[in-house]
Amino acid sequence: KNQVEQSPQSLIILEGKNCTLQCNYTVSPFSNLRWYKQDTGRGPVSLTIMTFSENTKSNGRYTATLDADTKQSSLHITASQLSDSASYICVVSGGSGTYKYIFGTGTRLKVLA
Amino acid sequence: DTGVSQNPRHKITKRGQNVTFRCDPISEHNRLYWYRQTLGQGPEFLTYFQNEAQLEKSRLLSDRFSAERPKGSFSTLEIQRTEQGDSAMYLCASSLGGTSGRPQQFFGPGTRLTVL
């Protein structure tokens, strides 16, 4: 069964600290993996996208890694800011059929001053 | 603003009423998706259009739900005889792609539905 699992479910950190969010997937065949940031009450916004051949991708203070062998991805946030408080959703594209975007349930990050 | 827009942003209705939401995708995007998202969960796929053709529907899309994209541009999602369990955020996304591949989706701000 195609699934995407994220951990932790929620996370609280102090401003300025780093954190790492995890995404494990069992989607086959694999096409690509995206991380989205979703602010409360808003739609998700794409942060990074990685295909099978890419193992790291950065977007400012956000760095995503992908290990296609172990089917794991991580999103590392450096020097967190209050505005990083949001849900971070991992989405894996793949599988068969005309539509296959498998969404994780997200990690809710709270950055405190 | 050339992003995906959704209207209304909020809708409060009484149980049993019908509601209709509208999504205007990015103008050149041929694919349009509807999702439902409840608090603390990721988006759940409802249905997907390529141009005006509805290519796939989730089992979540019961017979009370119907979606249309008559001219391959904007789309509407109608819920008939609403139930309290329909309360959620309804997200629309669009993308530009051919018949294969999984191009990036751009999401709208969502319509938050509250059924009393």
Image: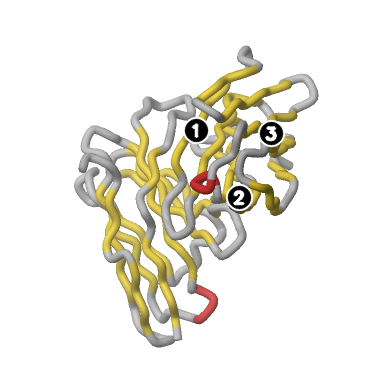
Q: Residues under labels 3 and 2: Cα distance?
A: 31 Å
Q: Secondary structure at mark 2?
A: strand
Could you say which quadrant of the image residue A75 lies in?
top right
Q: Nearer the viewer, mark 3 or mark 1?
A: 1
Q: What's under tag 1, amino acid-wise? A: Leu
Q: Which quadrant of the rendered structure holds the C terminus of chain B?
A: bottom left
Q: Is residue A7 left or right of residue B31?
A: right
Q: Secondary structure at mark 3?
A: loop
| Disc marking residue A27 | 3
Q: Is residue A28 left or right of residue A38?
A: right
| Disc marking residue A111 | 2
The answer to which of A81 and A6 lies nearer the viewer is A81
The answer to which of B61 and A45 lies nearer the viewer is A45
Q: Nearer the viewer, mark 3 or mark 2?
A: 2
Q: Residues within 10 Å of mark 2 (few under 14, many from 20)?
A: some
Q: Horizontal and vertical percent for residue A30?
A: 64, 26
Q: Secondary structure at mark 1?
A: strand
Q: Is residue A54 above or below residue A10?
A: above
Please check whether the numbered discs 3 and 2 fall on a single chain: yes
Q: Which residue is mark 1?
A: A47
Q: Horizontal and vertical percent for residue B6?
A: 29, 56
Q: Residues under labels 1 and 2: Cα distance?
A: 18 Å
Q: Is residue A76 above or below residue B108?
A: above
Question: Looking at the image, is mark 3 or mark 1 earlier in the sequence?
Answer: 3
Q: What's under tag 2, amino acid-wise? A: Val
Residue B9 in sight: yes
Could you say which quadrant of the image residue A21 lies in?
top right
Q: Residues under labels 3 and 1: Cα distance?
A: 20 Å
